[in-house]
Amino acid sequence: MKAQDIHLVWIRRDLRITDHTALFEATKNDAKVVLVFVFDTKILNLLPDKEDQRVDFIFQSLCDLNKQLEKYDTKIIIRHGDPIKEIPYVAQELGVTSVYFNEDYEPYAKARDQEVKGSLTKLNIKSFSFRDHIIFGSQILKPDQTPYVVYTPYKNTWLKKLKPLHWEEKRPQYNFVKVKDLKGLAKKITLREIGFSSHSTYYKSQNPSRSAAIQRLKEFSQNLSHYKENRDFPALDEATSLISPFLRFGLISVRECLRTIVKLKNEGARTWMSELIWREFFIMIMDMYPHVVNSSFKIQYKNLKWENNKEWFDKWKSGNTGFPIVDAGMRQLNKTGWMHNRVRMIVASFLVKDLLIDRRWGEQYFAEKLIDFELASNNGNWQWCASTGCDAQPYFRIFNPSLQSERFDKNAEYIKFWIPELSQISPKEIHHPEDSDLQNKSTYPKPIISHSVQKQKALRLFNPKK
Ligand SMILES: Cc1cc2nc3c(=O)[nH]c(=O)nc-3n(C[C@H](O)[C@H](O)[C@H](O)COP(=O)(O)OP(=O)(O)OC[C@H]3O[C@@H](n4cnc5c(N)ncnc54)[C@H](O)[C@@H]3O)c2cc1C
């Protein structure tokens, strides 16, 4: 490396400067670095809601990052456009010799990154990419060198391979180019300028800042020993980490999560580790089998004849199906952008196997609403619930909303919180809306379907010969 070398670090889904692989690699040998982020118009133009919570989350996180950078007298350059043009442009303007970034495994991101690398090569600028937001992903293969399609053996191999070096902190040197030398590129940008407006409320402790992310991990680590027994009860929603948006946008690194786990050698920590491995499993599946984005993993379920009743779909979206546990979840999602995992499973199963609606409709709705939306996890979990995915639950296993409700929200605390009009109704009636007349005792709607009738239809849909 020559003394005057400057490296550009392209920040994407890794909005932090701590424990950051690309930044660590770029600053080895004392090179100077500049950070850049691009609000990608190809992604933003597809978002239907101009008050999108994720865009605000990213924007606020960038503002927070700039505050952290003040002490180094620098700023992150924020651009709005197509990264294929923006990254080579910024690299050229600053005369950098190399561009560093962390890998992203979504099909769109992989294609985009290839194009950016190609353009940089033509300009004689090197580019380097690194695995950062996962530990292994598709590096874990079966002994015959093909990818796993079943979670448990994937997890077992993943755990066997894990060594302390995998959670070691990637500690960069903060040798940033000063703001005065950024050639006016670090201009202030507003959300309005990129066509969005702010979304000021965030669920619980999910505020977009590095300090909120660290605080959440710290608080959760005190509950981690009870994670296994409490994580399925949505009324105890701080029993899970609530860390998903921070992990999704990289305000916290997966290695920081692992360091928390390995310090606590209890059953809760081991179970939490398994969830982080589910995340990697689905990222690996998307990386290896990109057809899952538009189609079923299991090809035999590609052309199932869904009923796709639009009126029912609207009632599902707005939380008005007359099944309280489903509606509570959808109202939580609409209000906060987040939903408890157990309830995500219940509402997804209900959409597919009770309303007989194509899971892709539900998946798309989640993609528009979830603050932690992650293509791989969303797709993998929807396919799991719909029985169309790899290692999914079998098609004949159909959640009974009443039993799920009774088991996981016994006192209907979660339901009553999100559906206050049911606050005076007994849990028993709430759990069994088809046998109660909730609509006459409150303003809550009556059930739009009969679970037992729809269940039979779902079984026939998956297996017409039976
Ligand atoms: C239909 C459906 C759609 C989903 N869509 C998403 C999504 O778009 N983005 C997303 O991050 N998670 C998704 N999940 C998984 C899961 O619901 C959330 O990760 C979890 O609720 C986030 O809360 P937490 O951070 O408190 O989780 P914790 O229980 O504390 O788990 C810690 C982390 O592990 C990961 N994780 C946990 N469970 C899963 C899982 N089943 N699959 C993959 N990763 C998991 C997440 O990164 C999570 O933050 C979906 C689940 C279902 C059933």
Image: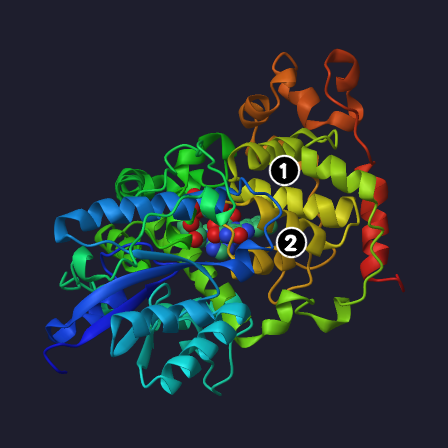
Where residue 323 appears, x then y in whole percent?
A: 71, 31
Q: Nearer the viewer, residue 155 or 85?
A: 85
Q: Nearer the viewer, residue 453 or 280?
A: 280
Judging by the rendered image, the residue that carries numbered circle 1 is 404
Q: Residue furthest front?
A: 184
Mark number displayed over residue 385: 2
Q: Check the picture and name the quadrant holding the N terminus.
A: bottom left
Q: Is residue 142 above or below residue 440?
A: below
User: Which amino acid type corresponds to the residue marked 1 in the rendered image?
Assistant: Gln
**Residue lying at 58% horizontally and 25% vertically, measured from the top left:** 418
Judge: label 2 CB < 8 Å from ligand 1. Answer: yes
Residue 447 left/right relative to 203: right
Residue 311 left/right relative to 398: right
Where residue 343 appears, x then y in whole percent?
A: 58, 40
Q: Check the picture and name the quadrant holding the C terminus.
A: bottom right
Q: Is residue 375 visible?
A: no
User: Which amino acid type corresponds to the residue marked 2 in the rendered image?
Assistant: Cys
Q: Nearer the viewer, residue 137 or 112?
A: 112
Crowding at mark 2 (Cα within 10 Å: few <14, some 14-19, many 20+):
many
**Residue lying at 34% horizontally and 58% vertically, measured from the top left:** 14
Q: Does dot 2 land on a helix, a strand or a loop?
A: helix
Residue 33 left/right relative to 453: left
**Residue lying at 45% horizontally and 41% vertically, measured from the top left:** 231
